[in-house]
Amino acid sequence: MWTLNTSPKVNVHVAQTGDCYDCHTNESLLKGMLRLGRKGIPVGCVNGGCGVCKVRIVEGAVRALGPVSRAHVSCDEEAQGYTLACRVAPTATVRLEVSARLSKPFSHPGNSSTTSNTKET
Ligand code: FES
């Protein structure tokens, strides 16, 4: 059954490319990122276990949706802002850097069908 997400949305900026997308405060950064329509955004386990969605929060605030694997985000990295996009939701406007495997789909400027997306899912 399809349900309308009525939670507030905040803006998320990808530092390396300037891509920008809206993300509900109750959905993961990865789910919102998928609406950018960029080819090759890796969707792995979606539960913090595989590490393909690693990002660094440069500015803004997020809240945990669940645990992240220490195999992919060490305590030191977490202190530097690294987390897994499938396991955090934004609570305020966020600026993030994609890293690891998530960097690849953002390495080609022409790989995006749009630079802004406000569609509901
Ligand atoms: S998709 Fe596997 S850790 Fe995010």
Image: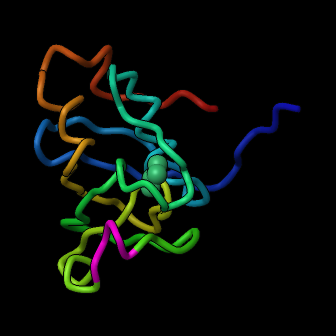
Percent across and percent down for residue 99 are: 19, 51
* Residue at (61% x, 31% y) in the render: 120
Q: In the picture shown, does residue 79 fall above or below 64?
A: below
Quarter-of-image position of residue 59:
bottom left
**Residue 24, horizontal then vertical, whole percent:** 55, 51
Q: Residue sitting at 24 percent across and 74 percent down?
A: 81
**Rendered position, 56 above or below 106:** below
Question: Coloring scheme of the render?
Answer: rainbow
Q: Nearer the viewer, residue 109 or 94?
A: 109
Q: Position of residue 13 (x, y in %)?
A: 25, 47
- Is the C terminus in the top left, top right, bottom left or bottom right quadrant? top right
Q: Nearer the viewer, residue 111 or 103?
A: 103
- Residue furthest front in the image: 71
Farthest right residue in view: 1
**Residue at image coords 18%, 78%:** 80
Q: Is residue 87 left or right of residue 8?
A: left
Total numbered circles: 0
Q: 91 or 52: nearer the eye?
A: 52
The answer to whether residue 71 is magenta is yes
Name the magenta segment's main secondary structure: loop
Looking at the image, which is closer to me, 56 or 59? 56
Q: Is residue 102 magenta?
A: no
User: Based on the displayed image, in which of its 4 quarters is residue 39 positioned?
Assistant: top left
Residue depicted at 24% across the width and 29% down the height = 105
Quadrant that contains the N terminus: top right
Q: Which residues are magenta?
A: 70-74
Residue 115 position (above or below residue 7): above
